[in-house]
Image: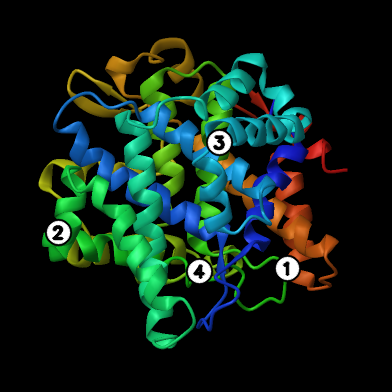
């Protein structure tokens, strides 16, 4: 069962500042970096998938495991971390210690999950899913560094860092997606547009800590949706679809900004108008950046994110939440739990309000959201998940 301790550990990445010894235009956090990394992993993975079968579960769980490792090793600067990693014996002992620190919060997810966490860091790193994640990690770091370089052109270590990053990327030049990022303007614009969601702060008009971005929030939703899917025994395709729906469900906000729920509810029909505008803007400015073969899938993730769907007789069909588990929980149906993603989204918003209040915010809107979401969600059962037990964990 998903518990409070793990959820708060994931959110702790929102307080981890990156490049905090450099001049920067805004705070760059570990949560946002990891979210951008998973967007890049999707992009790189889709291109590799065209060459052959790809372990998407390995990519998703690897992203989660690497985030958890990072939040434990918060004080290790990258050069020191990579020095330790170059020595297999030391790196193994370090990961043993990380596993011990995380054992209490991972144990509710079961022994098999804990075993996969530990084994992931012992696997050879030449597997495709490892290489996709490593390339995505470095590409997200380079994206950040390009911003910082403009503000620190003669800064200490800047040229050395640029050289190290360039050298580190060279071994991944054979990945199809890396060539696309080098050569194709549309691919770079896709990554840049997704990256802009790092700059859009949720609850922007309210003082709160930590301040989560739209993209960081989306990663939390994605991982929660994945863990819920795992808990209910979802098939492989269902877990993958639920994760990437969580990751991309707020993508239209790069074109419309984050419109908070009270505003959407203030005028009857306004939510529908916003949705219609989002679709028009996505058609005009976004989908054309993707290969045609990817566009239907991205529409499913970004536009119809709250619908339960399964692919039946070659067509996408809306189905009830209970039907997915009973009738369509097989890869051939490519099912997706929109209701489960929505529950994950609401839970993430609840925790954002919870943390802000715990950290001293007295904003009435936060207190109202905290109680409204709790009252709305805590009595629900969605796709076999008892949400009441999770919300009760925050008493």
Choose between 53 and 223: the one closer to the eye. Answer: 53
**Pointer 1: residues within 10 angstroms few (<14), some, or many (20+)?**
some
Tell me the quarter of the picture where residue 124 sits.
top left
Residue placed under numbered mark 1 in the picture? 209
Camera-near label (1 vs 3) is 3
- Residue 81 image offset from top left, x and y in percent: 57, 50
Disc 3 to disc 2, how far (Cα)? 33 Å
* 307 up-or-down from 138: above or below: above
Whether residue 244 is visible = yes
Camera-near label (3 vs 4) is 3
- Left or right: where 269 falls relative to 75: left
Residue 288 image label: 2
Of the numbered discs 3 and 2, the one sitting upstream in the chain is 3
Residue at the right extreme of this rendering: 395
Camera-near label (4 vs 2) is 2
Of the numbered discs 3 and 4, the one sitting upstream in the chain is 3
Q: How is the image coloured?
A: rainbow
**Pointer 4: residues within 10 angstroms few (<14), some, or many (20+)?**
some
Disc 4 to disc 1, how far (Cα)? 20 Å
- Left or right: where 183 falls relative to 252: left
Residue placed under numbered mark 4 in the picture? 259
* 64 up-or-down from 350: above or below: above
* 202 up-or-down from 65: above or below: below
Residue at 68% x, 76% y is 206
Assess whether mark 4 and mark 3 are in contact (beta carbons under 8 angstroms): no
Residue placed under numbered mark 3 in the picture? 65
């Amino acid at each position: 069962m998903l518990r409070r301790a793990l959820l708060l550990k994931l959110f702790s990445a929102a307080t981890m500042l990156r490049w905090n010894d450099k001049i920067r235009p805004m705070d760059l956090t570990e949560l946002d970096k990891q979210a951008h990394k998973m967007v890049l992993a999707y992009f790189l993975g889709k291109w590799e998938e065209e060459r052959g079968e790809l372990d998407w579960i390995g990519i998703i769980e690897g992203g989660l495991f690497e985030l958890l490792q990072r939040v434990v090793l918060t004080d290790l600067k990258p050069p020191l971390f990579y020095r330790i990693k170059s020595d297999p014996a030391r790196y193994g002992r370090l990961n043993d210690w990380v596993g011990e620190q995380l054992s209490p919060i991972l144990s509710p997810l079961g022994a098999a999950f804990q075993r996969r966490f530990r084994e992931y860091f012992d696997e050879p790193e030449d597997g495709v899913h490892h290489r996709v994640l490593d390339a995505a990690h470095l590409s997200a770091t380079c994206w950040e560094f390009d911003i910082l370089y403009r503000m620190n052109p003669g800064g200490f270590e800047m040229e050395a860092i640029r050289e190290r990053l360039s050298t580190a990327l060279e071994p991944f030049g054979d990945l199809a997606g890396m060539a696309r990022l080098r050569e194709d303007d549309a691919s770079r614009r896709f990554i840049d547009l997704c990256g802009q969601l790092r700059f859009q702060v949720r609850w922007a008009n309210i003082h709160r800590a930590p301040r989560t971005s739209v993209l960081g929030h989306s990663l939390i939703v994605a991982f929660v949706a994945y863990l819920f899917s795992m808990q209910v025994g979802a098939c492989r395709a269902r877990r993958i679809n639920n994760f990437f729906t969580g990751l991309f469900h707020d993508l239209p906000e790069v074109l419309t900004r984050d419109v908070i729920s009270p505003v959407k509810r203030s005028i009857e029909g306004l939510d529908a108008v916003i949705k219609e505008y989002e679709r028009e803007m996505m058609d005009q400015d976004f989908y054309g950046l993707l290969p045609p073969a990817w566009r239907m899938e991205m529409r499913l993730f970004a536009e119809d994110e709250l619908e339960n769907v399964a692919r039946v007789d070659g067509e996408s069909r809306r189905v009830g939440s209970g039907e997915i588990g009973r009738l369509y929980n097989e890869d051939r149906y490519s099912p997706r739990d929109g209701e489960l993603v929505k529950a994950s989204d609401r839970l993430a918003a609840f925790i954002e309000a919870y943390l802000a209040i715990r950290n001293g915010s007295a904003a009435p809107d936060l207190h109202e959201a905290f109680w409204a979401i709790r009252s709305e969600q805590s009595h629900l059962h969605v796709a076999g998940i008892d949400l009441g037990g999770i919300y009760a964990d925050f008493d």
